[in-house]
Image (cartoon, rainbow, N blue to C red):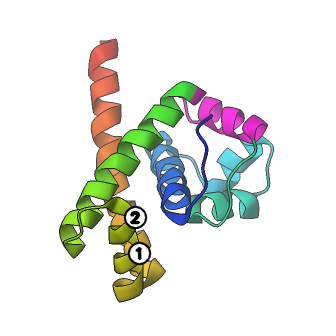
Amino acid sequence: MIVIGDLPDRLVLGNVVAALRAEQGLTQEQLAQAVGISQPTLSRIERGASVPDVLAYRRLAEALGVTASELDQLTLDAREGVDKAISGVVGESTPATAWKRAITVAGVALVGGVVAFAVVLFVRKWMAARKDAAS
């Protein structure tokens, strides 16, 4: 399992989980039940307010139809793409500075919306490529 620490990591992981859940056609309640956590806990994970423990992370991946390694890689790749997008928007070359400036200027809610949009597009592309590779 990747190490999730700062706010950008949590936002990206949460949005990856939410996007995969939507692609599977699951409600938060259904996914939470499959994983063995409460719906409010899943909501906090999806919002980036919390991170799952190792066991819940593995169960989340399984319930979303991916391996924990795939969820790791998808989250890392999505974070890289989001870092580039945020850096480009605010005109900063380093991701840490870009995130700090974006949050200061636009606030967490707006930056979270940008992250959600970027991650949904990334996950859809990833899922399509995975489906094509399987056929």
Q: Nearer the viewer, residue 8 or 14?
A: 8
Specify the amino acid type for callout 2: Ala
Specify the amino acid type for callout 1: Lys
Q: Nearer the viewer, residue 28 or 45?
A: 45
* Residue range highlighted in magenta: 54-68
Give residue 39's mark. Answer: none
- Residue 34 lies, with reference to residue 10, above or below; the image says above
Task: Locate residue 60: give its quadrant.
Answer: top right
Q: Is residue 118 visible to us here?
A: yes
Residue corresponding to mark 2: 96
Indicate the quadrant containing the N terminus: top left, top right, bottom left or bottom right.
top right
Q: Is residue 67 visible to us here?
A: no
- Where residue 87 appears, x then y in whole percent? 25, 64
| Residue 66 among magenta residues | yes
- Residue 8 lies, with reference to residue 62, above or below; the image says below
- Residue 52 lies, with reference to residue 100, above or below; the image says above
Tell whether 4 sits left or right of 105: right
Residue corresponding to mark 1: 100
Mark 1: which secondary structure?
Answer: helix
- Where residue 21 appears, x then y in whole percent? 52, 46
- Where residue 96 appears, x then y in whole percent? 40, 64
> For the point 51% across and 53% down, which residue is it?
18
* Cβ atoms at labels 1 and 2 below 8 Å apart: yes
Tell whether 82 sits left or right of 54: left
Tell whether 50 sits left or right of 19: right
Tell whether 41 sits left or right of 113: right
